[in-house]
Image (cartoon, helix red, strand yellow):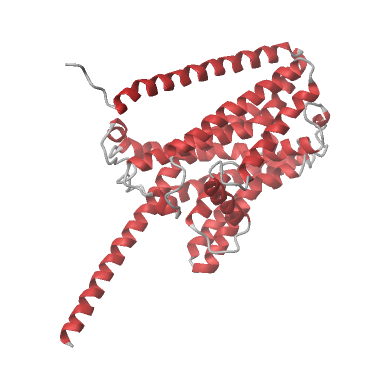
Amino acid sequence: MKNIMTPMQSAMPSATFLWRFKVILFLIWGFTCCKVGWDSVMRMDANLRDLFIYEAFLYYNPLLLVTMMVWLWGVNLWVFLQSSVSYPKIFGIDQNHLSHNEIWKCSTWMTIIVPTSMTTYLYLYSHGEVSLAASQPVLLYIVVAVVLIFPFDIFFLSSRFFFLRTLWRIAFPLQPITFPDFFVADILTSMAKVFSDLERSVCRMVNRQVATIAWLEADSVCGSHSIAIPMVLVLPYLWRLLQCLRQYSDTKEKTCLFNALKYSTAFPVIFLSALKYHVIPEQWTSLYRPLWLLSSVVNSLYSFYWDITRDWDLSGFSRIFKFNKPSVVSNMFYGQHWIYFWAIGSNFILRCSWTYKLSAHLRHNYLTVFTMTLLEMLRRFQWVFFRVENEWNKMTRSGIQLAEISSEDEKLLSSNIHDV
């Protein structure tokens, strides 16, 4: 008797083949980018090579970090989908929101486009096509901006509109603060260095300094001593502080003022660091550097304390890693005590290293700063699980209480009707 395959069964091998074919193409593309990029760097004069890499890194590392953050957000959504945490209810979004698969599709395209543009920049620059090389990061930034604000119903319009509206509410907290408002604003504080590098990149593009050495002058408009660097670094913390003050105005809860104080402790870290370039060395060593170190310690410890006692509820893990269908991941994480120690310990270490990337006078160590920013994003990725779970626990507890109150009201109402 002949085996009769259903359409679904016959489609499975072709889907598997297509997936493998995509992976092979992706690996070939990755190898090609690495090979071309490395050869291009090696073609440069040894004396200029480091400056060449530094400049290329400046233009592309913000978008590379954003790409990584999108990948991690997809992982967050996947974990929440497996558990009983309803993130659409927490964020107040409809059923047309982006799924983790769609998030990963976006991040896959970003993973392809950004390194391709960077490789093209390196290749053209090393082969003497300076003007064409200079156009690569400019075109990439324009494309990203156009896709983000494109007003027509393609490229996930509703999700883009929700994101842009949230950014607007963060920058101008003139209305009651919602969970998505301060949640996204908290994530932006972890990306302060990304904002700073974006400002440096756009400054050089506007002033036509891409693929030139005009920016090497430290005191130039786009130089490393510019006052714009600390001003941009402080923006996410200023937005979050204003949100806390707005929340206090609405609720009169003193906790909001203590939260605002936490964000204000980032200001001296940023501005004292920037003073190194504007005071004499003796003043920096004897006065401002000790103050900077003290403010860094205060900020790190205060932020760590707030994460553990306020943003997180470490009696949790009842929802995040308790999957609806038990799996290797849930067995590895759910109910395991080492998770608590890991969460607290890693958060403390990364909170302490967090001040490094906020310090303008250390930004010349670009690979170290990039690594610190990368680690901060991983800390924030971990933070998301606890913060969202904590919010969901609050919602479900309040829902149970409301249900109990409603039940009591119904009993009273029925008893009154009966008496009448």
| Residue beneath the point at 78% across and 30% down | 210
Q: Is residue 116 above or below residue 80?
A: above
Q: Quadrant of the N terminus?
A: top left
In the image, residue 32 lies at what x, y percent? 59, 15
**Residue 2 lies in quadrant:** top left
Relative depth, front residue between 49 and 2: 2
Q: Is residue 257 above or below residue 40?
A: below
Q: How many marks?
A: 0
Relative depth, front residue between 240 and 110: 110
In the image, residue 338 lies at what x, y percent? 33, 35
**Residue 113 lies in quadrant:** top right
| Residue beneath the point at 53% across and 64% down | 176
Q: Is residue 349 visible?
A: no
Q: Is residue 357 above or below residue 32?
A: below
In the image, residue 26 lies at what x, y percent? 51, 20
Relative depth, front residue between 348 and 210: 210
Q: Is 185 placed left or right of 14 in the picture?
A: right
Q: Is residue 27 above or below residue 196?
A: above
| Residue beneath the point at 60% across and 47% down | 152
Q: Is 375 placed left or right of 237 in the picture?
A: left
**Residue 396 lies in quadrant:** bottom left
In the image, residue 125 lies at what x, y percent? 75, 19
Q: Is 362 placed left or right of 69 in the picture?
A: right
Q: Is residue 47 visible?
A: yes
Q: Quadrant of the C terminus?
A: bottom left
Which residue lies most toward the front here? 1
